[in-house]
Image: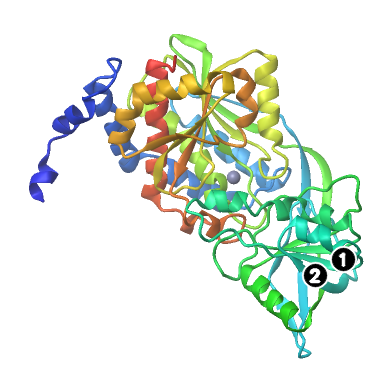
Amino acid sequence: MKLNLKLSFSSLAFLFSINMSLAQSDADVIFVNELHKLALKEGKSYDWLKELCSKAGPRIAGSKEYEKAVEISLAQLKSITNVKTSIQDVQVDYWKRGSSEIVKLFSSNGEVIPLVSLSLGNSISTDSFGITGEVIEVQNFTELEKLGDKVKNKIVFFNRPMDPGSITTFSAYGGAVDQRVFGASKAAALGAIGVVVRSMTTEIDDFAHTGVMQYDPKYNKIPALAISTQSAELLSSEIKNKGAFLYFKNHSEMIGKMNSPNVIGEILGSENPEKVILVGGHLDAWDVAQGAHDDGSGCVQSMDVLYLLQKMGYKPKNTIRCVLFSSEENGLHGGKAYAERAIKDKESHIFSLESDSGGFTPRGFTFDADTSVLKKYFKNVNDHFLPILEGLGYKVSIGGSGADIGPLKPLKGLLAGLKPDSQRYFDFHHTKRDTIDAVHPRELKLGAAAMASLVYLIDKFGIE
Ligand SMILES: [Zn+2]
């Protein structure tokens, strides 16, 4: 095996260069490999994440903790040579959780069993007495609607799990999350008094996962809570046995509009300063955790792209702009405000890349764009960069990019999402487990290197 290890870098570079478009050379292969080495040895992402998690911690948009996160990330961006920083004011809806939720199951044998729960983001509060009701379990909205009047004055329990057989955890999440987002109003339309939702995770554990829910203004607002998957299993077996009653009480409040800015740092382009390549993640995180994977990781990786390119001595042709978006979790206010301004100012965004799938080992990128240009751009990415990206172990495909950069689609640039290994992402997502200890420094740093490599290639060669 020693022989393999001794395969020189230049011979690897030669292998990757076969079939490569004329535009790239061995020098580019060497550059992106050096970028990866630099990221692992001297990259800043992990240290920056540690600082964000320990000093700002849980940072829902609108909160004092979010203000602290703005201060920390501005200072981190300012520490990079040649980076110009700014903030963009964003009006967000500030929702605040009060004291801990209480959920009790009255079992068929007379026991009172506490369940592990969290209010969903935007949920209203119960009154100070809480609510009690018989629980009706459903798997989906069709089943709920068939029950009709039978759910009147009851608590509806949405218990469809994320599909454990789905290879991509994001697909499993997409297949189950409608219950969390829309379940309360669907149940309220039939007269229910509250809802509990099985937590969005493939694990069976005792952590409740919060996340955004929305009320349909046509119906009464009723309180909505997530319960841990273990609690969901227990509740379901009780219902199947002899039926079950729940008591719950939560405290939460919609404080209203607050200014909670986007944070921006950029290196001006040497040839086309008016053309922007954007890298970003969202700075806000749910109020129950440090938001290390979601999405502190994406923020520090995006900042590290600027640091790594600068440290490599690379002078970008286009402006490389890092944007840390506000309020992705609770209304996408930061992404919408940023796109509104970019569209109004007719800014050219040739490429935007978001990291918001956790700080795990990078596996590749998914690409998206306006339908009029998507096929052309994707072909160009394949023709121009695939040998280099595959040489680094990365795959490319058409797919979603990122929630925050999605609103930039009308500008007709190329959009992309970093795709890390997502198998364990939903173990941590929106729970108190999403802490710095859950992020591996090497995995996080490799993600930053992958992003910097793609940014370098597109800056140098374009996508036309
Ligand atoms: Zn996120």
Q: Quadrant of residue 80?
A: top left
Circle 1 sits on which residue? 151
**Foreground residue, 371 or 245?**
371
Relative horizontal placement of residue 391, taking residue 159 as reference (left or right)? left
Mark 2 touches mark 1? (CB < 8 Å): yes
Most foreground residue, 63 or 95: 95
Q: Residues within 10 Å of mark 1 (few under 14, many from 20)?
A: many
Coordinates of residue 351 in the picture (x, y in percent): 50, 23
Q: Please give the label number shown on residue 136.
A: 2
The answer, for residue 204, to whether it is visible in the render is: yes
Answer yes or no: is residue 252 visible: no
Q: Ligand 1, what quadrant? A: top right
Does the Cβ of the disc 1 residue fall within 8 Å of ligand 1? no
Does 246 appear above or below 436?
below
Identity, as a three-letter code, of the amino acid under mark 1: Val
Q: Which residue does the image show at 71% across and 75% down from the upper left?
A: 235
> Would residue 451 appear left or right of 351 to someone viewing this image?
left
